[in-house]
Amino acid sequence: MLEEFQGQTVVIDLRSPYVCLGTLERWDAEHVEVRNADLHDLRDSDTNRESYIVASRTTGIKHNRRRVLLMRSEVVAVSLLRDVII
């Protein structure tokens, strides 16, 4: 299923208080690779997860990583940023 999201801007919700936004590059059995990513710790702001994602869709992703490898076991959901309802 991830094949249809490859090369597109995605939102990856993680089990932890982190969310990752960026371009889905590739994946394997253990990792998901995201390029030009915003790896955001939700504890660093007063904004909840949904508000942060909607704001990122509206104002653009604040890239803070060129490349991120996420543990697949920590991924809760993957969606296209354009599918986020404003």
Image (tube, rainbow, N blue to C red):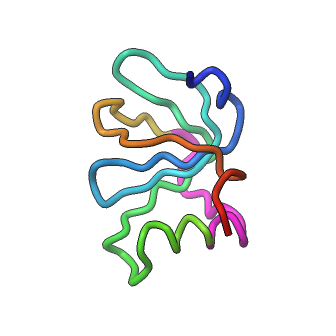
Name the side, left or right, on which 59 lies relative to 10.
right
Which part of the image, by quadrant, shows the C terminus?
bottom right
Picture coordinates of residue 21 (x, y %)? Answer: 56, 51
Query: For this rendering, which residue is in front, 33 or 64?
Result: 33
Q: Residue at x 60, y 34 (%)?
A: 24
Q: Please state the horizontal and vertical placement of residue 78, each as a whole percent of the image.
A: 51, 40
Residue 11 lies within the magenta run: no
Up-down relation of residue 42 to residue 4 (above or below): below
Compared with residue 17, is residue 29 higher up or lower down, i.e. above or below?
A: above
Query: Is residue 63 within the magenta segment?
Result: yes
> Residue 38 placed where, x, y %?
54, 56
Q: Which quarter of the rendered picture does the N terminus lie within?
A: top right
Q: Which residues are magenta?
A: 55-67
Q: Is residue 19 above or below residue 73?
A: below
Q: Is residue 69 above or below residue 55?
A: above
Residue furthest front as drawn: 85
Residue for point 30% across, 39% down: 74
How many circles with numbers are drawn on the protein? Answer: 0
Name the residue: 71% across, 65% down: 60
Snapshot quadrant of residue 59: bottom right
- Relative placement, left or right, of 30 versus 62 is left
Can you tell which quarter of the image residue 41 is in? bottom left
Is 27 displayed left or right of 14 in the figure? right
**83 lies left or right of 40:** right
